[in-house]
Image: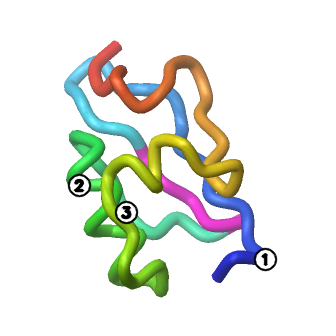
């Protein structure tokens, strides 16, 4: 998992952000907690919200971990 790029897409008007790993969409997160759970489910076991928010593995588009609605 650590060799892959996690992309958190721009927030939608209705809330939430699409999450991709490389070119594959893995789900939509509506909060940092949702994103953390989603990433745990695909292999980042043991990570908490601070790990996800501060990781160089995660690429945030149009807002960081505090932005979830356009």
The stretch in magenta equals: 18-23
Quarter of the view holding residue 65: top left
The residue at the point 22 percent across, 51 percent down is 33
Q: Quadrant of the N terminus?
A: bottom right
In the displayed structure, would residue 53 be above or below residue 68? below
Crowd rating for badge 1 (residues with CA inside 10 Å; few <14, some 14–19, many 20+):
few
- Mark 3 vs mark 1, CA separation in Å: 19 Å
The residue at the point 71 percent across, 65 percent down is 23
In the displayed structure, would residue 2 be above or below residue 15? below
Q: How is the image coloured?
A: rainbow
Q: Quadrant of the C terminus?
A: top left
Residue designated by label 2: 34
Q: Position of residue 34 (x, y in %)?
A: 23, 55
| Chain-order first, disc 1 or disc 2 | 1
The residue at the point 35 percent across, 21 percent down is 67
Asked if marks 3 and 2 touch (Cβ < 8 Å), the reply is: no
Q: In the image, which disc is placed on residue 42?
A: none
The residue at the point 41 percent across, 70 percent down is 39
- Mark 1 vs mark 2, CA separation in Å: 22 Å
Crowd rating for badge 3 (residues with CA inside 10 Å; few <14, some 14–19, many 20+):
some
Q: In the image, which disc is placed on residue 27?
A: 3
In the displayed structure, would residue 24 be above or below residue 19? below
| Chain-order first, disc 3 or disc 2 | 3
Let me know if residue 20 is in the magenta part.
yes
Asked if marks 1 and 2 touch (Cβ < 8 Å), the reply is: no
Q: Position of residue 10 (x, y in %)?
A: 51, 28
Residue designated by label 1: 3
Label 2: element kind: helix
Quarter of the view holding residue 24: bottom right
Indicate which label's residue lies in the foreground, 3 or 2. 2
Q: Position of residue 7 (x, y in %)?
A: 62, 49
Indicate which label's residue lies in the foreground, 3 or 1. 1
């Amino acid at each position: 998992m650590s060799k892959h790029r996690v992309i958190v897409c721009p927030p939608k008007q209705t809330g939430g952000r699409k999450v991709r790993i490389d070119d594959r969409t893995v789900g939509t997160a509506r909060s940092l907690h949702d994103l953390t759970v989603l990433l745990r489910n695909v292999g980042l076991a043991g990570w908490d919200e601070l790990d996800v928010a501060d990781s160089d593995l995660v690429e945030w588009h149009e807002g960081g971990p505090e932005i979830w609605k356009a």
